[in-house]
Image (cartoon, grey):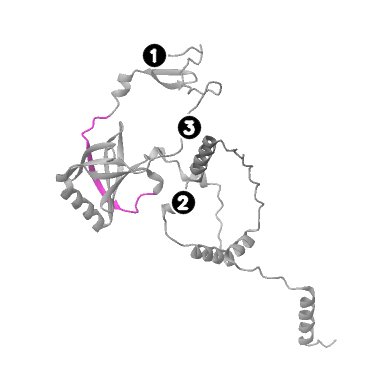
Amino acid sequence: MAPRANWKGFLKVAEVSCPVALYTAASTSDRIAFHTLNRATGHRVRRQFVDSDTGKPVERDEQVKGYEVGSGEYIMLDPEEVASAVPDSDKTLAVSTFIGCGDIDDVYFDKPYYLAPSDRNAEEAYALIREGMRTKKVAALAQTVLFRRVRTVLIRAHGKGLIATTLNFDYEVRSAKDAFDSVPDMKIKGEMLELAEHIIKTKSGKFNPKDFSDRYDAALADLVKAKIEGRKIEVRKEPKQEKVVDLMAALRESAGVKAKKPASCSTAKSKSKATAKAAPRRKAS
């Protein structure tokens, strides 16, 4: 069954345009999902909005959007007023700029979509845009109205097609300074850095998504299966906290390097005797 398009419109670069469609590239719909039930009856329960002051249920047609302007003070917005803020859409994904593929910090990436031609007559123009970007090793920045908002989209060549990734707005991305301000500016060098480089080199590889599994979802599936089959569920105990270990010792162990043994007392004494014999005696004055 062909996937359902999330959006249809036109991809436009200068005077070149072609009809395209956006398809979800990453989805959580296949994860194990649960419903909330009434333990006594086994029936599903439903949520109900109630007035926070009176405790009485509020019917759907009596619910409106509100913006808090003060503690417990709100302004109400009718659905028609909210709808008036939605920008007009011409269904055009208009490319404004081409940039280097690595020019955007990944922290701005929001959600990926497959951008494919929606009409056979568009295939040549679509291929032209894709191959032009691939040859010049650039990505395209474009804007359009998606899901009631004007969104900026990064478009990149991907195999036979294009990937369109929505970007977070600048005000949505928190400053890295807030998270890293207390991190000390430490310089790592010597054996410690060499060991770290060695470990990285021995573990170098390539990303293959099949190598990584969702262990939590798999465990939930096994749990549901066990319940269906009437098997006993063993409750797992919390793992014990690992002890803090010496960083250098951990690096050496990871790299398979044995720690340097300290000199023994007998060795130290023999070395001091040899030094004493080798040193010339000073004449008494």
Mark toward the viewer: 1 or 3: 3
Contact? badges 3 and 2 (CB < 8 Å): no
Start and end of the magenta stretch?
87-105
Task: Measure how far apart labels 1 and 2 are at the Cα level.
Answer: 47 Å
Question: CA separation, marks 1 and 3?
Answer: 30 Å
Taking depth in this image into account, of 285 and 200 the one nearest to the observer is 200
| Residue 207 horizontal side relative to residue 274, left or right | left
Which is more N-terminal, label 2 or label 1? 1
Rendered residue at 49%/40% (across/down): 221
Residue 81 % position (x, y)? 31, 20
Q: Secondary structure at mark 2?
A: loop
Is the C-beta separation of discs 1 and 3 under 8 Å? no
Which quarter of the figure has residue 259?
bottom right
Q: CA distance from mark 3 to mark 2?
A: 24 Å
Q: Position of residue 194 (x, y in %)?
A: 55, 67
Circle on res. 34: 3
Q: Which residue is mark 2?
A: 212
Q: Position of residue 40 (x, y in %)?
A: 56, 21
**Split into 4 quadrants, where in the image is the C terminus?**
bottom right
At label 3, counting other C-alpha atoms closer than 10 Å, the crowd grade (few under 14, some 14-19, many 20 or more) is: few
